[in-house]
Image (cartoon, grey):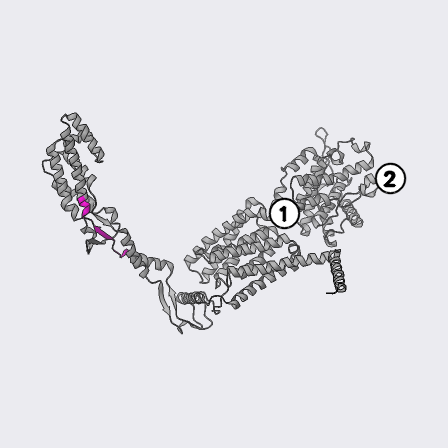
Amino acid sequence: MSPKRKRRGAVRLRQLYRRLTDSRGAQVLGRITKNTYRVILLVAGAALIEIAFPASSVPDLPTYEAGMIASEDVIAPITFPVYKPDEDLMRERMEAVAGVPPILELRPDLADSAMAAVGAFFASLDSMANQHEADADLLAGLADVVSAHRVPTSAERLAVLASAARRAQLKAALTAAFDKPLRAGVVESGALGTARIFSLRTGEAEVLLQRDSLRTIEQFYQDAWSYLPSDMAADARTVYNNLVSRFTIPTIRLNVAETEAQQALVRAAVSPIKYEVLEGERIVAAHDRVGGEQKERLDALRAQLLLTDGGWDWKAHLGGFLFNLLLLVAFGMVLRYYRPGIYDSGRSVTLVFVMLLVVAGATALISGSEAPWQLIPIAIAALMLATLYDGLLALVTVFVLVGLLTIRQFPGVSVPFFTFAGGAAAALSGRVVRRRAQNWAFAAVIAGAYVLAAASLALLGLHDVGGLLESSFWGTVNGVGCTLIATGILPLAESFTRITTDQSLLELADLNRPLLRRLSLEAPGTYAHSINVANLAEAAAREIGANSTLVRVGVYYHDIGKLKKPQYFVENQPPGRNPHDKLKPATSAGIVREHVLEGLALVTEARLPDVVKAFIGEHHGTQKIGFFWERAKELEPDAEFDPQEFRYPGPKPQSKETAIALLADSVESAARVLQDPTPENMRALVDRIVDFKLAEGQLDEAPLTLQEITTIKEQFVTVLTSMYHHRLDYPSQNQQVVEKPAVQST
């Protein structure tokens, strides 16, 4: 490239840079960046939802619920199985397993082990008897042998074992009992369970036996008594019984591994297929009522087509992506043209799309598991958006979520309708709850909507009684769970979006909060003024549809800066004492002006939200502090003063709510000193003050219409007249009443 072209290119780049960095270029660049971010959100949201719910190239089968009338014939395009319901399959497998006889094994060698243990025990006894001749030493030695072999017997019965003749009799009886009955087979009752037939393996042979044919260990104990001499004493019989209990070993054992293996084979042999529908077979005929069997076949066909889908199908995935994108674009257009404040806020847009993706992710987990579909948490998004913004936006979001998450993924009417009912109830229940302590009302409204939706589906024949109860139960769980989750994360959402909800405002309206309590104690006149202005402004805000809760809370704090120097404001001064009399007008104006800045500092330290701070900065706008300006000009007519030192710092009111506060503040202050507060005089006062504010341009930046200003004035007159009307002049207690006092007109 030639040097001349390089210089020309550099000049063009500098020109482009200047265009982008000037004020108009910066605005254009910011607009492009803002819109690009929102487009990225739309595309990413459509893609992520498609990944969570992949589309399929399955033919669009007609969707029928049981009880509906088929509009066309449905013919099976392939041969497909209809599977048994899970509960039926489980029941059949349990019945099959119950028919498998447990496998028992006869172990004669265990009888030899028992006899060997008996022989060792008596050999130890004989050896001990040969070593000790004295009775005391012999009994002590026998006690050691008995303890070593863990034979349960008492010290009093050791004398039985001290006798050689008794030992011989006991050993012979035990050996005879173990040699024949125990070798023939003895089983523990606990190993038999509830089975009635068993398979007994004896070496290579295997025979089936009834439960009654098996000798239990309890029966063996009874039979063992027959091998004792009939003349044996009671103490010897007790010792014999203890020896039988100690040395008996069950010789029939349950083969757990073999039994479980046989049961597994039988369980696997139970086919999960209920029956097959052949290719070309008619599933449902046109104009016929769809019954349970036809619905079962349609669901099975759809599931089979999904299984046999040819894997990755770019057309189906592209179609699913476009389906999602179109719905999201329509939603974005609603935000752009009908909720521009939300659209322009990057934080709000981010929160809205995060809520969409959270509900989509939860729905994907539910659809891919055995969790009830009634738990789709659409109410979380609806509650969050209704509380932060408004119910209409939340309702539109519910429509979009139902379209994105249920229409393609859950064919039929039941799931979309049921999900929409709960989401709509959550979106429109914002008016029900104004305090966090009443959030249980959210859960009640949502749960009630789910129950009614389930009842309507049951009455339409789309649910049976079991489905009605199941949907009602899980819907109630859903409503309670979504309310708890939304309530828990709402403060985080408020912090992220910097939005203050009515619930938070009502908490700030508590007159026992530290700043307001200080105001009532340290500046009682200002406190009373703030309460009166709040009542006045709230009534006007409610009349024009502004946020009356925000107005009340904002006015509570609008003069909080007077806490720094309360005695310099007339409402807190005792009669005859005005500290401004000793100050220059400029100094006095600075003190009055400073209460705005001090108020902003106090609420910033207390971490109050920006919407409340706005009332402090805007409730005087940029008005002139007229009294001290005129006084300064009077005292020093030739001096030049900076007009900004005699004006409030502003800004002018930027919202309807702060504009109402500005008007109410001035009107209430003037009305308190009105000598004759008749309705006519009050109306003239209100008109004069409001017209003056308009003429001064203090309402130029507030979005109030002339009709709204007229309504505000009318409301001011009504409220102020009731607040400051004449009272009757009642006579004092010691004054003699001669005639009735005349009632003064108000």
Classify residue 570 by image quadrant. Answer: top right
Front residue of 173 and 725:
173
Whether residue 233 can be seen here = yes
Does the stretch in magenta take in 102? yes
Mark identifier at residue 439: none
The residue lying at 29 percent from left, 54 percent from top is: 260
Which of the image's four quarters has the N terminus?
bottom right
- For disc 2, the marked residue is 633
**In the current view of this chain or complex, which residue is farthest to the bottom?**
280
Q: Amino acid at mark 2?
A: Lys
**Magenta-drawn segment:** 98-112
Name the spot of residue 500 as percent of width and height, x first. Answer: 63, 47
- For disc 1, the marked residue is 500
Classify residue 220 by image quadrant. Answer: top left
Q: CA distance from mark 2 to mark 1?
A: 44 Å
Pointer 1 local density, CA inside 10 Å: few below 14, some 14–19, many at least 20: many
Q: Amino acid at mark 1?
A: Thr
Classify residue 744 by image quadrant. Answer: top right
Q: Earlier in the sequence, mark 2 or mark 1?
A: 1
The residue lying at 17 percent from left, 26 percent from top is: 137
Whether residue 402 can be seen here = no
Name the spot of residue 228 as percent of width and height, x first. Answer: 12, 39
Name the spot of residue 186 as percent of width and height, x first. Answer: 19, 47
Name the spot of residue 619 as percent of width and height, x first. Answer: 73, 44
The residue lying at 85 percent from left, 38 percent from top is: 632
